Amino acid sequence: MCKCVCVCVCVLQGYTSFWNDCISSALRGAMLVELALRGRIHLQPQSMRRKPLLERKVMVKSDAPTGDTLLDEALKHIKNTQPAETVSSWIDLLTGETWNPMKMHFQLPQVRERLAKSLVEKGVLTTDKQNFFLFDMTTHPLANEKEKERLLQKLQASLLDRWTNDPHRLPRRTLALLVLAHGGDVLEKALAALPDAQYETAAQRARDMLETNANQHSGKATNPTEEIIWAVLAAVNRG
């Protein structure tokens, strides 16, 4: 999976937190975004009736392998599922949040651990043991502080020095990072080190962009990938 997306939602915490419930949904959203960025999926085309983002189905554009095990597992599920599901449904299904026993097989197991292992292999994280009350738990602290700082600066700059006042002018991967950091409930922490005045400016811009109606943004999207990104935002804002 795209290194920037994975590191954003996993590493801004400083470790892969097991206590942040938002991370699981953000990771599944990241998979959908990355599949869209790689040209594998898109949303059902709009009709004259203009369906909302969360009512449009996810369609497969190409089933060519991505070379990433998790992405290929998700793509296979999407391809083989009829009728097609929406972005919000896929986030729930891939996370295992469904009451339908016939759809439990869509859950991708141990995603956080598998991503952490990948980032350990890339030298971004390391493996350690940490005591939580009576139990020892495997954790993955940062091995590469420079990578974290690079991502923090990229997120901060996108809302300050490189702010365009129009999210549709942001690079797609930068837009995805902001959406996924918001969805994973780590964006506020990414901005915390800023001086007060810059923090207020960046936080207000983030709220204006990320807490508004994603359907309005998607109406101005210039390509199918942006529609998937806005649909993921609509899904995480739905809660």
Image: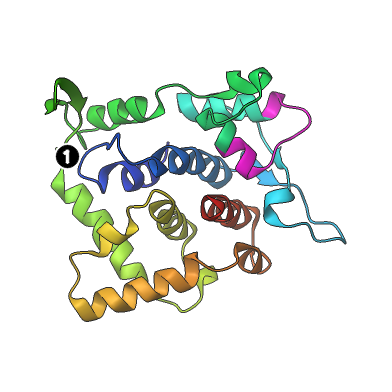
Depth order, front residue of 56/161: 56
Observer able to see residue 232: yes
Start-end of magenta stretch: 79-91
Picture residue at 77% right of the left edge, 28% below the top: 82
Q: What is the x, y in percent for residue 58?
A: 69, 41
Q: Indicate left or right for 105 with 124 as reference.
A: right
Q: What is the x, y in percent for residue 222?
A: 64, 64
Picture residue at 26% right of the left edge, 43% below the top: 11
What residue would you read off at disc 1?
142
Which class describes the residues within 10 Å of circle 1: few (<14), some (14-19), or many (20+)?
A: many
Depth order, front residue of 18/181: 18
As for residue 171 lying within the magenta part, the answer is no
Depth order, front residue of 224/99: 99
Q: What is the x, y in percent for residue 75?
A: 60, 30
- Where residue 164 sits, quadrant-wise, is bottom left
How many marks can you see?
A: 1
* Quadrant, the N terminus: top left
Q: Indicate left or right for 77 with 82 as reference.
A: left
Residue at the right extreme? 48
- Where residue 213 sits, quadrant-wise, is bottom right
Picture residue at 43% right of the left edge, 70% below the top: 207
In the displayed structure, would residue 200 be above or below residue 19?
below
